[in-house]
């Protein structure tokens, strides 16, 4: 059990608890964090769980796969530390992680 | 190879040579002259060699009861399935008995149908196994007019072209447009007759989508009906999707007219930019600013193809969802009551309308290698059709899938926009237009009553309406 903070575009913070192994998208959806659609249900096929990981945490979120890279490249709001929430499986090392949500999902 | 596939592959090779010649001439010859030259060429070729084998014209006959057919005889390419209300039973049988189904003798040739939600998602996601080239509908591109569009391109060319235009419909820009869309929607709704029946399709659905397209393209507003006309003509071709149009010479005339209008628009934009005007966010301007698309005018088949894509993509889809929502709320009056009691449900209802209507029935792919699905081997080169209309009614995915439920929980999972790299680029615009329409309708009317049976269009691709008679009851003040 640890904590992850989602920060909406208007700076509203949502501090959530998580079990390692759940994806960032699922944690956001389970906690009704606004701004995460997750239309495809975690299949890396819609790009609507786009999140921007805080710089200092980006290295802990694992590598970006080909399919994720392709979906991210279609997102107009893409930033340096963008990830699709459904592709980031949480680990114990992510306790305290902060992610920012973009203003819009594609 | 059969004679039919041989004939088609020969004509595709000829078309590739022809496209190169068209591109070479593009710098000196106006594009619409070129299209008219192509028209003459194709007509001469048909006189000498005969027309390429194709489905020809479709004559409506009663669709057979699904229970009387052997499974191999089930043909979901029939363009009258939707009009005659038989599509639901046909696709349910395929989902239950043959989720990956082979049809050998359709008027469009052989093809596989994939009808369950999970399987469609698999095909859509695995774009390296299933190519989108050269066309994404069941049939063939019209002979002699092989328009190229990024929806029917594979990576990496697809990715580059899509990126260069997607900003026009990016949510950031839509925010700026919301006020304009609301204003134009209000104008149309305020002009509607009260208490007397009228056809909702041309008066509301077509009118609103036409206005929107003209805005997105910065196309001359007074000529906006041309956009609708071209789109209807392209999407209604018999050879590509079982539509009502078989006269190719008229198709070339449309393409030539479109070439003339869009060339004018292109050059006008270029001149305004050169004169120091700030670049705008319309689609043509964005093409001119993209590194890989800034010379697209010199590649007429690509230029026309991509503009046709944006017009068709924003036309039939939104239009038929605007009509479909009215019909759905009439077929499920308890949902209309729920909506009036709680207008907060509009955004969720918009997704449910798009699921329930599924304005585009399918997308087609070609297998790039042998692929096993449900014990069947799809061979390299085979056509595979993903039936979104079926996936959205798959009882394995959606509870009571045929019911229209405006507060359905998992409705955003609907497959109408497709998934993967070809997912609908205009999804947020479509949702925005529909949300505004319903917000503005609820402000003005207590009832939108459907009076009479709707007329549905002939197609295996577009699931739409040509007539929906309605009567409005204004809101009690």
Image: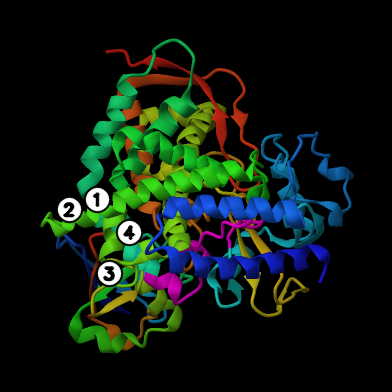
Residue B102 image point, x, y percent: 78, 62
Residue receiving disc 2: B272
Helix, strand or loop at label 1? It is helix
Q: Nearer the viewer, mark 3 or mark 2?
A: 2
Q: Is residue B340 toward the left or the right of residue B397 in the image?
A: left
Range of residues picked out in magenta: B135-160
Q: For mark 1, what is the residue?
A: B268
Location of residue B248 (image quadrant): top right
Q: CA distance from mark 4 to mark 1?
A: 48 Å
Q: Are marks 4 and 2 in contact (CB under 8 Å)?
A: no
> Foreground: B120 or B303?
B303
Residue drawn at 23 percent across, 60 percent down: A103
| Magenta span dominant secondary structure | loop
* Disc 3 chain ID: A
Identify the disc placed on residue A16.
3
> Closer to the N terminus: mark 3 or mark 4?
3
The correct choice, above or below, for A4 with respect to A101 in the image is: below
Q: Picture coordinates of residue A64 (x, y %)?
A: 37, 84
Q: Position of residue B290 (x, y in %)?
A: 29, 68
Q: Which mark is residue A32?
A: 4
């Amino acid at each position: 059990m640890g904590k992850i903070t989602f920060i909406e575009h208007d700076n509203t913070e949502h501090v959530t608890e998580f079990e390692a192994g759940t994806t960032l998208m699922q944690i956001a959806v389970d906690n009704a964090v606004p701004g995460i659609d997750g239309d495809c249900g975690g299949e890396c096929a819609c790009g609507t769980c786009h999140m921007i990981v805080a710089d200092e945490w980006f290295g802990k979120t694992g590598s970006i796969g080909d399919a994720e890279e392709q979906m991210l490249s279609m997102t107009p709001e893409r930033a340096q530390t963008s990830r699709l929430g459904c592709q980031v499986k949480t680990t114990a090392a992510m306790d305290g992680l902060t992610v920012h949500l973009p203003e819009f999902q594609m | 190879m059969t004679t039919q596939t041989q004939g088609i592959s020969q004509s595709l090779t000829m078309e590739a040579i022809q496209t190169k010649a068209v591109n070479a001439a593009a710098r000196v010859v106006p594009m619409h002259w070129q299209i008219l030259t192509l028209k003459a060429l194709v007509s001469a070729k048909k006189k000498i060699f005969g027309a390429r084998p194709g489905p020809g014209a479709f004559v409506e006959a009663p669709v057979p009861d699904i229970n009387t057919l052997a499974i191999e005889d089930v043909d979901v390419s029939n363009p009258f399935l939707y009009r005659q209300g038989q599509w639901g039973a046909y696709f349910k049988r395929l989902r239950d008995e043959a989720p990956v189904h082979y049809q050998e003798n359709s008027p469009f040739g052989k093809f596989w149908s994939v009808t369950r939600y999970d399987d469609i998602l698999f095909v859509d996601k695995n774009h390296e196994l299933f190519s989108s080239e050269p066309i994404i509908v069941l049939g063939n591109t019209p002979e002699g007019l092989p328009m190229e569009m990024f929806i029917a391109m594979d990576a990496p060319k697809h990715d580059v072209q899509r990126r260069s235009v997607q900003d026009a419909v990016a949510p950031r820009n839509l925010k700026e447009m919301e006020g304009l869309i609301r204003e134009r929607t209000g104008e149309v709704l305020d002009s509607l007759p009260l208490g007397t029946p009228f056809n909702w399709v041309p008066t509301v659905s077509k009118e609103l989508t036409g206005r929107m397209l003209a805005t997105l393209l910065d196309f001359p507003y007074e000529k906006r009906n041309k956009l609708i006309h071209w789109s209807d003509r392209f999407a209604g071709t018999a050879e590509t999707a079982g539509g009502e149009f078989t006269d190719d010479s008229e198709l070339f005339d449309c393409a030539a007219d479109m070439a003339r209008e869009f060339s004018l628009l292109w050059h006008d934009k270029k001149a305004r930019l050169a004169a120091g005007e700030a670049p705008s966010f319309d689609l043509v301007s964005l093409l001119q600013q993209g590194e890989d698309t800034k010379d697209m005018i010199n590649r007429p088949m690509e230029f026309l193809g991509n503009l046709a894509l944006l017009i068709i993509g924003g036309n039939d889809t939104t239009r038929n969802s605007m009509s479909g929502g009215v019909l759905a709320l009439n077929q499920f009056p308890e949902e209309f009551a729920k909506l009036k009691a709680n207008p907060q449900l509009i955004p969720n209802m918009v997704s449910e309308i798009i699921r329930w209507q599924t304005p585009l029935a399918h997308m087609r792919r070609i297998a790039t290698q042998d692929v096993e699905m449900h014990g069947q081997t799809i061979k390299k080169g085979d056509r595979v059709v993903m039936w979104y209309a079926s996936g959205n009614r798959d009882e394995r995915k959606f509870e009571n899938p045929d019911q229209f439920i405006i507060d359905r929980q998992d409705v955003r999972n609907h497959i109408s926009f497709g998934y993967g790299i070809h997912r609908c680029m205009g999804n947020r615009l479509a949702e925005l237009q529909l949300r505004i329409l319903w917000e503005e309708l609820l402000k003005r009317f207590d009832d939108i009553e459907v009076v009479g049976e709707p007329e549905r269009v002939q197609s295996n691709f577009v699931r739409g309406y040509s007539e929906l008679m309605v009567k409005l009851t204004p809101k009690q003040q």
